[in-house]
Structure formats: structure tokens, C-alpha cells
Image (tube, rainbow, N blue to C red):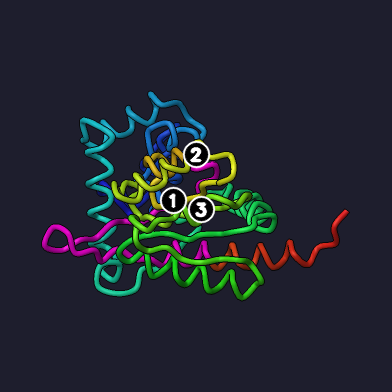
Amino acid sequence: MAFFGYNDAKTLVGVDVAIYEYILAHETGVPFMHVRDLAAGAHVSNSSVMRFIRKMGYSSFPEFKVAFHKQSLEASPDLETGVQLLTAETFPSTLQRTLDLVAQTILTANNVVFTGTGSSANVAEYASRLTSTLGINSFPVTDPYYPLIPQLKQTTKNVLITLSVSGQAAEVLGMLRQFQNDPATTLISITGHRDSPIAMISTYALTYHTTEHRIHGHYDLTSQLPAMTIVEALARTIRRQAQLPHH
């Protein structure tokens, strides 16, 4: 995709070329980046990025990101009207490493609870069924006011996995904080925001990038495909680790 009127990268010089080419190669990830992320990816300084942004006519990096994202949608209307396919930019490069650690934790747990509300509740139920098929003692909790503490009171090695796109659901966060300092429970999250409160209190956070879509202020149309992909990748990782010989 050409942008800012540049159809030929040869019109750019110096570090601007590296920045331009990096932006084009990571189009879907740019709206989620900070200046330091773009600078590190293009192997230039933060100040070089900001000089480039100002050359393009923008006074700030957030202003540039909004304009760039809008142009991307206009160039690819199917992102709004059709199926938005997953790309490498949807997930962090460290995802599989974290999946390995989570799978190890689940395989040594006595109880695994998947929780979420709204659309995430459906994914939690699916995740619980999928892991149960692998022989994991797993069950879903889709009511944040469910008396989970009494149920787990006499148990050890519990894993509580929360699904939340925003990572900010107040009622879910309230439930999780009851387990935050519980040595018998490991908190894990699957969320679209790595800096969210739910992710921050989790021992392991499996994160992804997505754009939230709501209509009439609160009806959620955000895709659950990234979360489903992580759930299925987790199931495959558990199955692979369970088949490895123990040393």
C-alpha cells in the first residue's frame, strides 16, 4: 500500500526509507505500536521516527496512527465488511514460549477453570470442553459471582484462565483479585490488551492484537477469532507436551 502520496519509495532518502519500508511490511501492527516499537523495528532512533512523521504532515504519532489506520481500512474495505484474517502481526513473537509455560502449568494442575463474560464466556466454555477432551480436569465459570472460592478451598494447584478482549471487565477483575495472593492458584489470561488490569495481575498473559467493534455503545461485535486461535494452540501444546517422555 502506498501512503502519503508516495507511490515510489525511491523518492525517499536516508533513514526515511527504512521507516517507510517497515511501516509497509507491518501495516496491520502499526496502529498498535508506540514510537519506540516502530523505531526498534526499523533500526532507527525515536527522533528519526518523529522527524519522518512530521515530514508526512502530522504533529504527533497518535495523529499519524489514526490517519494510517483509516487509510488502510479504505484501501481494504473487506476488513470492515467481511472476514478479517489473522496475520503474523496479530500475535506477539513470544506467544509459543508462553504457551509452553502455560501448558506445563496446566499439566501439573488439579483443577483448571476457564472464565469469561459475554462473548468470552462462549470461548471459555469451548476451551474447557477442548482441554477436558485431553484429560484435563477442567470446567467453565461464566458467572463472575459464582462461589468459586468455597469450591476450590480444599484444593491445591488450581489454574484460573480468564478470557477478556479488553482485559478490564470490572466484575471479572473483582473475582480474580480474590485469588491474586493465593499460592494454590495460578492466574492466566487470554486478552487483547497486554497492559490491561487482568493481564497485569496474571502470572502468564497470552495476548493478541485486535480492533474492538461495538454498536449502539455496548453491543460487542469484536472478533473472538484471535482468542479461539490461542485456545486451540494451547490445546495442541498440551497434547504435544503430554506425549513427551518424562525425565
Where in the figure is residue 161, as x and y percent of width and height?
49, 55
State which tag comes first along the sequence, 3 or 1: 1
Where in the figure is residue 149, as x and y percent of width and height?
46, 50
**Given contact means CB atoms under 8 Å apart, are the residues at marks 1 and 2 in contact?**
yes
* Residue on which the image places disc 1: 26
Q: Secondary structure at mark 1?
A: loop
Foreground: disc 3 or disc 2: 3
In front: 194, or 172?
172
Residue at 41 percent across and 26 percent down: it is 46
**Circle on res. 41:** 2
Vertical placement of 80 versus 192: above or below?
Answer: below
Q: Amino acid at mark 1?
A: His
- Quarter containing the N terminus: bottom left
Q: Is residue 85 visible?
A: yes
Whole-angstrom CA distance, mark 1 to mark 2, is 9 Å
Vertical placement of 152 versus 120: above or below?
Answer: above
